[in-house]
Image (cartoon, helix red, strand yellow):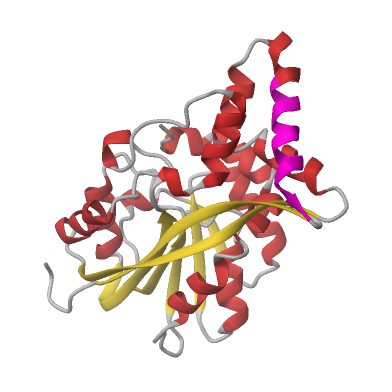
Amino acid sequence: MTGGADWRARVGDAWAAEWLRTDRSFAELDPALLAAALDGLGEGARVLDVGCGAGATSLAIAAARRDVAVTGVDLSAALVAAAEKRGAGRATFRVADAAVLTGEAAYDRLVSRHGVMFFDDPVSAFAALRRATAPNGRIVFSCFRARALNGWATEPAAALGVETGGADGQAGGPGPFAFALAGEVERILADAGWRDARGEVVDYDYVAGDGADAVDEAVALLRRIGPAARAIADAPRDRQGELLERLAALCAAKRSENRVAFSAAAWIWTARNPEEPA
């Protein structure tokens, strides 16, 4: 289980250190998410990127639509610092908890790349997000589907002989697979007052490493992020070398030409804030 406190500290720091590699891992999902985020976006719109991380989605929207104002928020000060450094004034970034937004001006579009699965109380959080959204404004977010469909998580865990975590959906608590089940996502959005929820299935390659050093790059990512990372960190020091060797062997076996890629399965959800308060 990974919650907000983790993102403020250990997890957020790891992602901030690895943002170039994590951006690469999501690169083949990004076009579909960006297309959904821009669909029907009006001139001069205000966009809020929830769980913006190091700013990839915020900056992609700002580059595609220079007339819109983009704000990215994240729990992690380290990630926000990374976003500000690469953003060069093209978007605004700040440390904030999107689950408790108050006093916000109305945003026309909310977007999130895998940043909404970590709320302790998702209905309350999505209700707060809706209250920060203009009438008829929309939310667009991506999240992982079932754990079994995501080889980036299951294959390294199997190679190291560890579990990948809890159950899919809300039963597993906050974490990468908390929104894996479509029925639960629909219920959460409806209970939070959103309408017209629709989930689109997107399968893509999770590129863990590429280039001449693809295997080393993949190991560098997976040893810090995901189930393998926790297993290695928790192992006795005298076993960590063995686990890293297993991880390297898996990445070498997954290498094709100049990249190491795993399967990834996501949803892209859209929903509307009704014109009249729910």
Left/right placement of residue 91 relative to residue 272 reads right
Magenta stretch containing residue 251, yes or no? yes
Q: Quadrant of residue 178?
A: top left
> Where residue 190 sits in the image (x, y, percent)?
17, 61
Residue 106 in view (yes/no): no
Q: Position of residue 116 (x, y in %)?
A: 39, 52
Residue in front for this viewpoint, 249 or 30: 249
**Residue 239 coordinates in the image, percent (x, y):** 69, 13
Q: Quadrant of the C terminus?
A: bottom left
Location of residue 143 in the rendering, given as x and y in whole percent from the top left corner = 42, 55
The residue at 39%/52% (across/down) is 145
Q: Does residue 157 show up magenta in the picture?
A: no
Residue positioned most to the bottom: 43
Instruction: Kindly identify the residue that appears in the image at 56 percent across and 84 percent down.
Output: 65
Q: Is residue 28 visible?
A: yes
- Please tell me in which quadrant of the rendered image residue 241 appears: top right
Side of 122 relative to 215 (left or right):
left
Q: Which stretch appears magenta?
A: 243-256
Left-right relation of 138 to 53: left
Q: Main secondary structure of the magenta part?
A: helix
Point out the residue furthest to the right here: 212
